[in-house]
Amino acid sequence: GKPRVVVVGGGAGGATAARYIAKDSKGEIDVTLIEPTRMYYTCFFSNLYLGGFKEISDIGHTYGGLAAGGVNVVHDWAVGVDRDAKTVALAGGGSVPYDKLILSPGIDFVDGAVEGWDLSAQNAMPHAYKAGSQSELLKAQLKAMPQGGTFAMVAPPNPYRCPPGPYERVSMVAHFLKQNNPTAKIIVADPKEKFSKMALFQEGWNNHYAGMVDWVGSDFGGGEVSVDPGAMTLTIDGEVTNVDVCNVIPAMKAGRIAELAGVTDGNWAPVNAADMSTKADADIYVLGDASQQGDMPKSGFSANSQAKVCANAVRGALTGSKVFPAKFSNTCWSLIAPNDGVKVGATYEATQEKIAKVDGFISATGETSDVRKATYEESEGWYTGITTDMMG
Ligand code: FAD
């Protein structure tokens, strides 16, 4: 029969890989995508939803386009991988055979990463680091804050999904509060000394939200953090603060199925840069956030870029089609205030050892409002482009 590719996870990495393999192999390869949700909410632009720039429906995407493109979409959880039999077990029972298996499950949280918090507390203190109901919950809590109340964030340690994500979120929350609750305060407890685009965010917070954002980095004790979801308190270095909303973003690791497949080493799955195959198993590939690949940040743009390299290599391995040298790129845009967009990005190549950065760029502080507006508009074009590239 035809060669079989199974893809686990229909997000930025998995949906792209499934779509490209089905499209480019023109029916020569059977492609099955295993994804539990019927609607994929992008984390990208979920901060803009918090800020009031998008509706939740704007960031939700169905799998009908992939199915129409020839991908066999199975809405279920993958719960195990038998590497000898080459099958993936489904939560609903049964198993799916593969010749090549691509895992792009995104992230899970490291147990015990923030003292006082675990998944059972995610309603009292949402992470909103997987989009959808968690994003809606955080927005509802933001809207319900009393006048002059306190919004707290516990930021994650490196490495984590979307390096500028927490700080874009602070900006979007500040924008919402400036409009609706101007005497409210934002506290950020951060285990890091510095963060992505720090100078740009701090410039923006001073310009747009003066006096509202109190960022406490590890230099100042932000590393010593605990929360009490029952009492709604945040404790930094022994000092207890009552908070109205507490967005806890814990330390991250590869989505659990990567660990169950036995392709992780520590928190992440090491891969070969040329094709995204794992170091542990040449027939299992890991894309996106779950992979440990080298210099690329964990972003949707990166996952999509890695997926195309992987799709080309997998197709070549199964059908003998031409395989092109691996090239990758990434840009992370962030919105600080209306029409005030900034970006950071780079191009990459595959070396023996890792995905290695070739060249990069970053927005400058003090740019004109025209430049910042153009940067924001670029991000809108990117969003339409990547979601179409993923979902068809
Ligand atoms: P995901 O896109 O998370 O997809 C994983 C999928 O796997 C999910 O649909 C999940 O349901 C499924 N899955 C998990 N386990 C299983 C299983 N066992 N069986 C079956 N399916 C499973 N990136 C950007 O490029 N630009 C941005 O502006 C940006 N902004 C962001 C803002 C925020 C607030 C956050 C949190 C992230 C942002 N990102 C951004 C990062 C981006 O969302 C991720 O890097 C990207 O989604 C990673 O793609 P992925 O395929 O690895 O995982």
Image: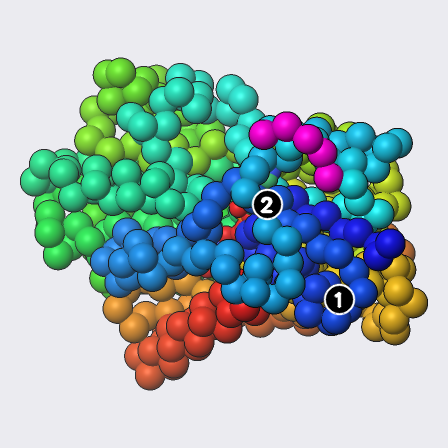
Which residue lies at the image location 71% right of the left edge and 34% below the top edge?
95
Secondary element at tag 1: loop
Secondary element at tag 2: strand
Q: Residue furthest left?
A: 147
Separation of marks 1 and 2 at Cα, in angstroms: 18 Å
Say which of 301 and 21 sits in front: 21
Q: As shown in the figure, which amino acid type bears the numbered disc 2?
A: Val
Say which of 343 and 329 sits in front: 329
Say which of 26 and 366 sits in front: 26
Q: Is residue 220 visible?
A: no
Q: Quadrant of the N terminus?
A: bottom right
| Side of 361 where 117 appears, left or right | left
Q: Is residue 4 visible?
A: yes
Which residue lies at the image location 60% right of the left edge and 29% below the top edge?
91
Say which of 369 and 228 sits in front: 228
Q: Main secondary structure of the magenta part?
A: loop
Q: Residue furthest front?
A: 1
Picture layout, residue 60 above or below residue 81: below
| Side of 281 where 63 appears, left or right | left
Which residue lies at the image location 56% right of the left edge and 27% below the top edge?
110
Q: Is residue 153 magenta?
A: no
Q: As shown in the figure, which amino acid type bears the numbered disc 1?
A: Gly
Q: Where does label 1 land, which residue?
A: 27
Q: Which stretch did the figure color magenta?
A: 92-96
Q: How is the image coloured?
A: rainbow
Which residue lies at the image location 70% right of the left edge and 64% below the top edge?
22
Q: Where does label 2 land, which residue?
A: 74
Q: Which mark is residue 272?
A: none
